[in-house]
Image (cartoon, rainbow, N blue to C red):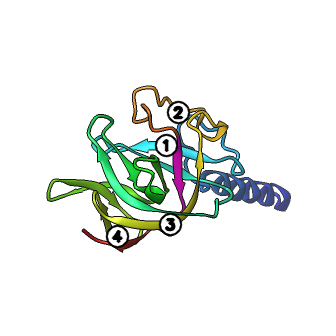
Amino acid sequence: MTRRTVCSCVGLAVLTLLISGCGGILAGETGDPALPRARFIGADPRILVHVMPIEMQASISGELEYSSAGKCLVIKNRYGAGVHGVLVWSDGVEPAVKDGKKGVRLADGSLLLEGDHFMASGGSVQPNAKEFAHLDMSNWCLQGSGSLIVLNSDVRHTKRT
């Protein structure tokens, strides 16, 4: 085997490892890292998680509420406005249940359960926004809620009830 052949084989092997090591692609994605990625996880509660290339920076605060009709988590009393939208969590957040209360386990391992007050940065988008167009939300939690509240990874408790 010549040196050129060995170098070509090694180069091809390295390229293959780099491509395969870039991580999985979520359902419905094109694989473009500049595009947002979103997926549903869990059954009850069923949550929507995202990876956004650029984070929104609005201040979000309110109370976590569970919707039994949609088996989802919503924000309540955002600026005193009642239920304001369905929550979209940053990747790494998982659905959780403790003592009958529904909620999420945050990336740092802490629990945020229904009735807990929280703050985060993020923003609001319409359910039909292009970032979420690949998802089938027809049988999920959007009846009458109006918008999706996209949270960044900085979610923290402000008061526990």
Determine which residue is flagged by label 2: 135
Q: Position of 137 compared to 105: left or right?
A: right
- Tell which circle, 4 or 1, labels the residue nearer the N-terminal end: 1
- Residue at image point 47% right, 31% down: 137
- Residue at image point 59% right, 39% down: 126
Mark linked to residue 120? 3
- Residue at image point 68% right, 58% down: 54
Task: Describe the element under mark 1 as helix, strand or loop.
Answer: strand
Determine which residue is flagged by label 1: 39
Give above or below for 102 relative to 128.
Answer: below
**Residue type, numbered disc 3:** Ala
**Residue type, numbered disc 1:** Arg
**Residue type, numbered disc 2:** Leu
**Residue type, numbered disc 4:** Gly
Q: Position of 78 compared to 70: left or right?
A: right
- Crowd band around label 2 with a 10 angstrom C-alpha radius: few (<14), some (14–19), many (20+): some
Determine which residue is flagged by label 4: 109
- Tell which circle, 4 or 2, labels the residue nearer the N-terminal end: 4
Residues under labels 2 and 1: Cα distance?
Answer: 7 Å
Residues under labels 4 and 1: Cα distance?
Answer: 20 Å
- Tell which circle, 1 or 3, labels the residue nearer the N-terminal end: 1
x%, y% of residue 60?
52, 62
- Crowd band around label 3 with a 10 angstrom C-alpha radius: few (<14), some (14–19), many (20+): many
Residues under labels 3 and 4: Cα distance?
Answer: 16 Å
- Tell which circle, 2 or 1, labels the residue nearer the N-terminal end: 1
- Tell which circle, 3 or 4, labels the residue nearer the N-terminal end: 4
Residue 71 vs residue 28, the one in the foreground: 71
What segment carries the magenta color? Answer: 147-154
